[in-house]
Image (cartoon, rainbow, N blue to C red):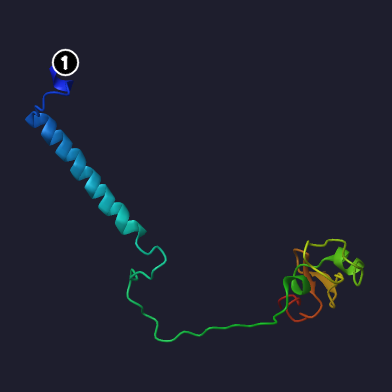
């Protein structure tokens, strides 16, 4: 029988004490570090740098032209214009119809990029 692991004796050597103390202090330090990370993850934090901007202009332009009407023509969408959509979701009611672009498009420039007919001056070649 190994006397070190016997239940009847409570002998503790200095090496065992220091080993246990070191691992306990390491666990406490790790708990403290992890606790600092989880406190208010969505709370505002201090900025890394001081703010330099004096004024800010915010542009909220609702109702601007969509990419379909400007640079991304969808010919199939124009073919299906005013036909009923077969795709339905579970809780939606009523009829859904396809709506095509009200503008035409043409290929412009050296690359042949599709562009809306509404942007005549952007499509002109440079002089």
Q: Residue at x 75, y 74 (%)?
A: 70
View extreme (front): residue: 8
Q: Is residue 99 above or below residue 19?
A: below
Locate the C terminus by quadrant: bottom right
Q: Is residue 26 above or below residue 19?
A: below
The percent coordinates of residue 96 (x first, y second) are 85, 70
The percent coordinates of residue 37 (x first, y second) are 34, 57
Front-lying residue, 121 or 60: 60
Asked where in the image residue 98 lies, by quadrant, the reply is: bottom right
Front-lying residue, 94 or 53: 94
Which residue has dot 1 on it?
2
View extreme (top): residue: 1
User: Is residue 25 found left or right of 70 in the rendered image?
Assistant: left
Front-lying residue, 12 or 59: 12
Locate the N terminus by quadrant: top left
Q: Is residue 30 above or below residue 10?
A: below
Q: Count of labels shown?
A: 1
Q: How many C-alpha atoms fall within 10 Å of the one at disc 1: few (<14), some, or many (≥20)? A: few
Q: Residue at x 39, y 69 (%)?
A: 43
Which structural element holds mark 1? Answer: loop
Asked where in the image residue 47 lies, by quadrant, the reply is: bottom left
The percent coordinates of residue 35 (x first, y second) are 31, 56
User: Is residue 38 found left or right of 125 in the rendered image?
Assistant: left
Q: Residue at x 60, y 83 (%)?
A: 60
Front-lying residue, 49 or 9: 9
Asked where in the image residue 90 lies, by quadrant, the reply is: bottom right
């Amino acid at each position: 029988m190994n006397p070190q692991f016997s239940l009847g004796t409570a002998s503790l050597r200095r090496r065992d004490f220091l080993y246990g103390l070191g691992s306990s202090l390491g666990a406490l330090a790790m708990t403290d570090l992890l606790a600092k990370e989880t406190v208010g993850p969505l709370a505002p934090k201090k900025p890394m740098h001081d703010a330099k901007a004096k004024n800010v202009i915010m542009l909220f332009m609702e109702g601007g032209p969509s990419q379909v009407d400007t640079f991304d023509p969808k010919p199939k969408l124009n073919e299906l214009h005013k036909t009923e959509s077969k795709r339905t979701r579970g809780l939606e009611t009523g009829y859904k119809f396809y709506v095509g672009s009200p503008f035409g498009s043409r290929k412009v420039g050296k690359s042949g990029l599709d562009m809306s007919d509404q942007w005549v001056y952007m499509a002109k070649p440079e002089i």
